[in-house]
Image (spheres, rainbow, N blue to C red):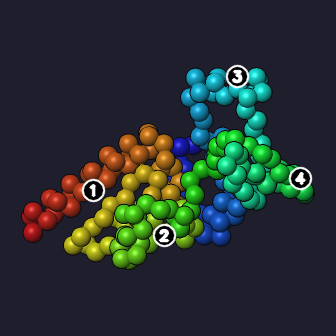
Amino acid sequence: MRPLTDTLWRSLPTAERRRFLRHLRPFWDVHRHRTAPPVDAAIRDEIASGGLTVRAGRLIDIADDPAQAVVTLRLRGAERTERLAVQAMIDATGFGHLAQSQDPLLRRLLERGLVRPEPFGLGLEAGPDYRARGTTAARPLWLLGPLLRGVLWECIAVPDIRNEAVELASLVAADLDRAAAA
């Protein structure tokens, strides 16, 4: 499906994209993004030995303590919350919302209005030519990779980024050729 996913994503009305994000994104992310076999084997060994416990649910709160953290969560399918004392946690929820980013360059670009978030806050708004919306033709800013999430759906894995980079390089070269001819 990878070659068709972005076309399908772009063709969905905004309401259907929102619905997908609300109901299906977690399942998509789990099945779409696999781990490398050696890492999978190490994780399975840790689970089998009792050194790692995997819990699926919604994180409600984290209270820090010097020796541990106390996590309040609601397990998937449960109505009540549960509190766990843990020494380590792994956040496997995927990419967060753009508003949560502390990246200084990204924050400055947003503050100056040179870029703007796409409607779902997953990445930045961009046109089909990878140009960030909010930039001018005289000073274009092109986007690539995870910053395009929300505009493109398949923009995180290396093969996707590699294909986007080839397409973007072609578009930039064409722009440079037009500018040189003018």
Frontmost residue, 118 versus 182: 118
Task: Identify the amino acid type marked 2.
Answer: Pro
Frontmost residue, 14 versus 81: 81
Frontmost residue, 98 versus 138: 98
Residue 15 picture location, percent across and down: 65, 70
For the N terminus, which image quadrant? top right
Real-space Cα separation, disc 3 to disc 4, in angstroms: 27 Å
Query: Which residue in the protein does label 3 denote?
Result: 45
Q: Does residue 88 sit above or below 16 in this rendering?
A: above
Question: Which residue is found at the position 64% from the left and 47% from the top?
Answer: 91
Q: Are marks 1 and 4 in contact (CB under 8 Å)?
A: no
Task: Identify the amino acid type marked 1.
Answer: Leu
The mark found on residue 171 in the picture is 1
Q: Residue furthest left?
A: 181
First in sequence: mark 1 vs mark 4: 4
Q: Residue furthest right?
A: 79
Q: Are marks 2 and 3 in contact (CB under 8 Å)?
A: no
Query: Which residue in the protein does label 2 denote?
Result: 117
Q: Does residue 4 sit above or below 131 in this rendering?
A: above
Q: Are marks 2 and 1 in contact (CB under 8 Å)?
A: no
Residue 175 picture location, percent across and down: 21, 61
Question: Which residue is found at the position 35% from the left and 73% from the top?
Answer: 114
Say left or right for 161 vs 91.
left
Say left or right for 55 vs 14.
right
Q: Is residue 173 visible?
A: yes
Question: Which residue is found at the position 24% from the left and 57% from the top?
Answer: 172
Task: Identify the amino acid type marked 3.
Answer: Asp
Mark 3: few, some, or many residues within 10 Å (few <14, many ≥20)?
A: few
